[in-house]
Every structure is written in structure tokens, then in C-alpha cells.
């Protein structure tokens, strides 16, 4: 299943999280670290880190992760981005201290191990808690929310019509077949 920038825009619109620069970034993109940060508020390193996390937590059937994730996180409301950026930086700093390289340079299995070593798989999400709790809340849960807010992603867990998409209400109102 291939995700696109358009899917990310749908997730932002349906999730109520769209920021001012989302549409502009979708059309132009960013080519280097300085222009990326100027256009989106995220450095290239920060975007690569978030994409690398998504490559671990998204199901293996999902493709097009970089385009989807970059569009999704750069399109979030500025308040959400302001919460996200310091968590990315703290996470990146921790990973560099432990593994002597950026998170996105680790292999996917080693990224998974790094996340488990941090404890994000065992922590309850807390926006103001410890680093693992904040990573779980601001990064992992936000990425999963973006994925499962679009029909392509929600189909992976058996939801045909996520909230806000046509047919959702009607599909729940149909009468069961009388012959069953």
C-alpha cells in the first residue's frame, strides 16, 4: 500500500491538524537543510529522524513513507509542531549519545532495538513526562494517528471508512441481509 503526500493532506484535513504551510510545502518541497527549516520549521535531520521512526512503527506493507510523513508533520498546526520539535531534538541527542550516530543512519532492526531500549514500547504516552513517554506521545502516537486517519491506513486494521470520510455513517446504518 503506497501512501502519498495527498494522503497526508487528507489526514491533516480530517484530523483537524492542518497548518498554514501544508499546501505550499506539498507543491514545492524543500531541497536543503536551510530551505527545509525556513519553509517548514523542521531541519532535514529532524525530518529524517521522524521518517526513520515511521519506518519502524508503520506496518511493512506501507510504502511511500518519506513523502507521507514529511507532508504530514510539516503540515501540522504550529502549536503541534512546537510540541514536536523539542521531543525530536531530545530523542536525537539521546540516540547520538548512545549509538554515536543519528537515528536515521541505523538499520531498521537497530532502530527498533533503540526504541525498545528507550522503553517507548512499554511506556504510557504523556506529553510532559519522561523522554520515552514524550516520544511515545508526540512522535509515535502522532505518526500512527496520521496513518490510521486516511482510508488506506485504516484498512490495515479493518476500518473501511475512518471518521470524516464519505460512506462511514451510511455503512453503519445499513440493515443486515434478511436471508442471513
Image: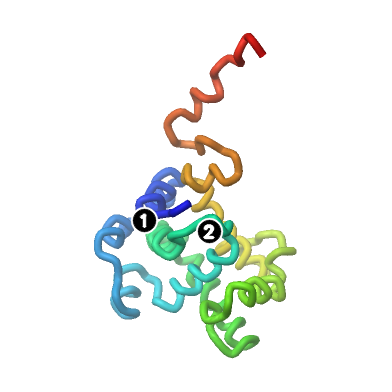
Asked whether, in this view, residue 49 is left or right of residue 95, the answer is: left
Residue 8 image offset from top left, x and y in percent: 41, 53
**Can the viewer see residue 18 in this picture?**
yes
Asked whether, in this view, residue 81 is left or right of residue 37, the answer is: right
Which residue corresponds to mark 2? Answer: 143
Classify 18 as above or below 35: above
Which residue corresponds to mark 1? Answer: 5
* Front residue (pair 33, 59): 59
Q: Quadrant of residue 159?
A: top right
Residue at 65% x, 86% y: name it: 98
Classify 88 as above or below 150: below
Q: Secondary structure at mark 2?
A: helix
Q: Measure how far apart labels 2 and 1 are at the Cα level.
A: 14 Å
Residue 105 image offset from top left, x and y in percent: 52, 81
Q: Which mark is residue 74?
A: none
Q: Quadrant of residue 25?
A: bottom left
Q: Quick one: label 2, few (<14), some, or many (20+) residues within 10 Å?
A: many
Furthest residue to the top? 178
Classify 145 as above or below 94: above
Amino acid at each position: 500500500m503506497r501512501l502519498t503526500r495527498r494522503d497526508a493532506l487528507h489526514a491533516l484535513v480530517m484530523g483537524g491538524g492542518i497548518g498554514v504551510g501544508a499546501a505550499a510545502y506539498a507543491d514545492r518541497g524543500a531541497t536543503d537543510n536551510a530551505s527545509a527549516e525556513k519553509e517548514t520549521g523542521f531541519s532535514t535531520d529532524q525530518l529524517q529522524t521522524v521518517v526513520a521512526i515511521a519506518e519502524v512503527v508503520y506496518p511493512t506493507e506501507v510504502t511511500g513513507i518519506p513523502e507521507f510523513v514529511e507532508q504530514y508533520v510539516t503540515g501540522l498546526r504550529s502549536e503541534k509542531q512546537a510540541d514536536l520539535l523539542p521531543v525530536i531534538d531530545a530523542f536525537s541527542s539521546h540516540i547520538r549519545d548512545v549509538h554515536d550516530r543519528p537515528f536515521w543512519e541505523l538499520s531498521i532492526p537497530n532502530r527498533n532495538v533503540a526504541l525498545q531500549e528507550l522503553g517507548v514500547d512499554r511506556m504510557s504516552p504523556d506529553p510532559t513526562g519522561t523522554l520515552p513517554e514524550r516520544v511515545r506521545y508526540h512522535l509515535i502516537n502522532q505518526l500512527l494517528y496520521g496513518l490510521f486517519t486516511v482510508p488506506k491506513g485504516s484498512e490495515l486494521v479493518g476500518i473501511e471508512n475512518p471518521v470524516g470520510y464519505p460512506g462511514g455513517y451510511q455503512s453503519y446504518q445499513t440493515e443486515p441481509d434478511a436471508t442471513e
